[in-house]
Image: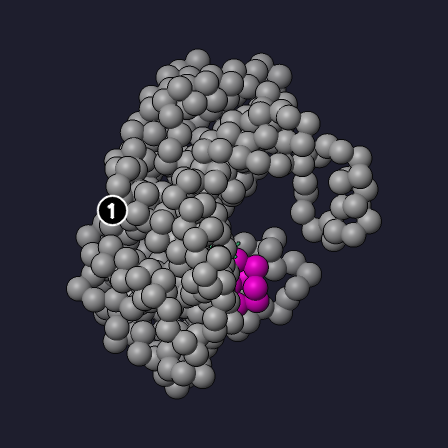
């Protein structure tokens, strides 16, 4: 990295992130280059936002066209792009009917869902049950919903009204319901919490509990949505329709965009004056999202997500036979977790030195969120590096 870039960061940028000493300059698909010309293979493009990899051509073209025509108008006006995006999402939900609201990020989408649940719940019904190990964002409402005390440290008190149940435990959710409860909110597959797939019957059981107690069922699909798991939304893997789904990350192929869709009877509680976002649903983000959806559809990338999962699964499960410290492969589409019995940070560092970008979450889970456009050649090349480093990890740990 150039010394002046580093110096500028040290002097002017608040150090709230742990950054690699690398300055990235440009990217194409699953490849990205730093300012010294080094090429990296990216198995974690944009922290889950790069569902089509870096600079997908149709998204670039749509943004260029839109940005030259109209960059931003507030929500006092209609725009073609916002209406088309709402239609594209609602019609892909598979629900009988749905309505959309737009904002700019995942945490904002969850703030909107929390407010909508409280507005819909009515007088005295404000409590929301969420899950331990969940991650819903960093603003105070979404942070309060996040069932991880480490993220609450130093910024408490949290917003009142959140109670946490272990992920996968239906009885624990049932025990937390009281007359003040208005919703159950969860990631259908936990992402930051370690790529945790719910046990059979859990999602269906939550729907039954919600129906029995007149609660909303909210799915945070910020990480799982937009084709990541091989279906438009992860909840399509179960015969369950939620009341609200929140989206962001991959929604606009890397351009900041968030939103939610809700059943119309629920959506009507969001009346003028109750909620807003100045940049929400701006035409540039909406054009990018439409181009993302069109690319996924026309290039058959939902099916590709499953092929990628299967290829990774085969390789990692074969590795597990000789590496007992690699204990489990968990994945749905291009949402992949490799559970280790030891710390994963050394693998991330070693892979980065070999120009492969991956992530580790919850200390012991290697997390991959590769692009749906990842080729077999790229997958095999990167996976070979990952396998070597996972194998080496056990040798150094023992
Ligand atoms: C499931 C989930 N919800 C919400 C968020 C927060 O999204 P953002 O960082 O866009 O606010 C994240 C981010 O990682 C996430 O994974």
Q: Nearer the viewer, residue 214 or 263?
A: 263
Reply yes or no: does residue 124 show up in magenta: no
- Point out the image quarter for the C terminus: top right
Residue 78 figure quarter: bottom left
Residue 140 magenta-drawn? yes
Of 355 and 137, nearer the camera is: 355
User: Farthest bottom residue?
Assistant: 123
Q: Residue at x 23, y 59 (%)?
A: 91
Q: Position of residue 74 (x, y in %)?
A: 47, 73
Residue bearing the label numbered 1 = 237
Q: Is residue 66 above or below residue 23?
A: below
Write the residue at 63% across / 31% down: 34
* Residue 346 seen by the camera: no
252 and 232: which is toward the camera: 252
Left or right: residue 96 versus residue 66 is left
Label 1, secondary structure: give it.
Answer: helix
From the top left corner, tell me how far across and down residue 88 is, in percent: 28, 57
Task: Examine the rendering and report whether any part of residue 119 can be seen.
Answer: yes
Residues in magenta, as a range: 136-143
**Count of labels in the image:** 1
Q: Residue at 52% of width from left, 15% of height from top?
A: 388
């Amino acid at each position: 990295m150039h010394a002046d870039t580093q110096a500028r960061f040290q002097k002017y940028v608040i150090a709230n992130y742990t950054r690699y000493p690398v300055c990235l300059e440009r990217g194409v698909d699953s490849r990205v280059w730093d300012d010294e010309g080094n090429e990296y293979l990216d198995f974690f493009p944009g922290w889950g936002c790069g569902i089509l990899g870096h600079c997908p051509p149709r998204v670039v073209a749509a943004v260029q066209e839109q940005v030259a025509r109209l960059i931003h108008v507030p929500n006092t006006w209609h725009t073609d792009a916002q209406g088309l995006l709402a239609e594209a999402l609602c019609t892909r939900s598979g629900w009988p009917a749905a309505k959309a609201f737009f904002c700019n990020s995942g945490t904002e989408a969850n703030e909107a869902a929390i407010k909508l649940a409280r507005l819909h719940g009515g007088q005295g019904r404000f409590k929301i049950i969420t899950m331990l190990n969940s991650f819903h964002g960093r603003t105070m409402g979404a942070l309060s919903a996040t069932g991880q005390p480490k993220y609450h440290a130093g910024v408490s008190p949290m917003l009142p009204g959140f109670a946490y149940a272990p992920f996968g435990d239906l009885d624990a959710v049932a025990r937390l319901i009281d007359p003040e409860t208005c919703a159950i909110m969860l990631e259908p597959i936990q992402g930051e919490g370690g790529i945790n797939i719910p046990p059979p019957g859990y999602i269906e059981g939550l729907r039954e509990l919600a129906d029995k107690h007149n609660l909303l069922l909210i799915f945070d699909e910020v990480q799982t949505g937009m084709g990541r798991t091989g279906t438009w939304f992860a909840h399509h893997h179960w015969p369950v329709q939620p009341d609200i789904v929140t989206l962001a990350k991959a929604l606009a192929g890397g351009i900041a965009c968030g939103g939610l869709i809700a059943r119309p009877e629920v959506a009507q509680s969001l009346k003028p004056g109750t909620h807003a976002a100045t940049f929400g649903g701006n035409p540039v983000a909406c054009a990018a999202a439409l181009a993302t959806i069109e690319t996924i559809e026309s290039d058959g990338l939902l099916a590709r997500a499953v092929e990628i999962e299967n290829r990774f699964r085969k390789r990692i499960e074969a590795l597990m036979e000789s590496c007992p410290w690699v204990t489990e492969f968990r994945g749905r589409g291009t949402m992949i977790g490799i559970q280790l019995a030891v710390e994963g940070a050394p693998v991330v560092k070693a892979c980065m030195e070999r120009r492969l970008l991956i992530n580790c979450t919850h200390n012991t889970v290697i997390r991959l969120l590769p692009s749906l456009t990842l080729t077999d050649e790229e997958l095999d090349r990167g996976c070979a590096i990952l396998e070597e480093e996972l194998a080496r990890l056990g040798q150094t740990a023992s």
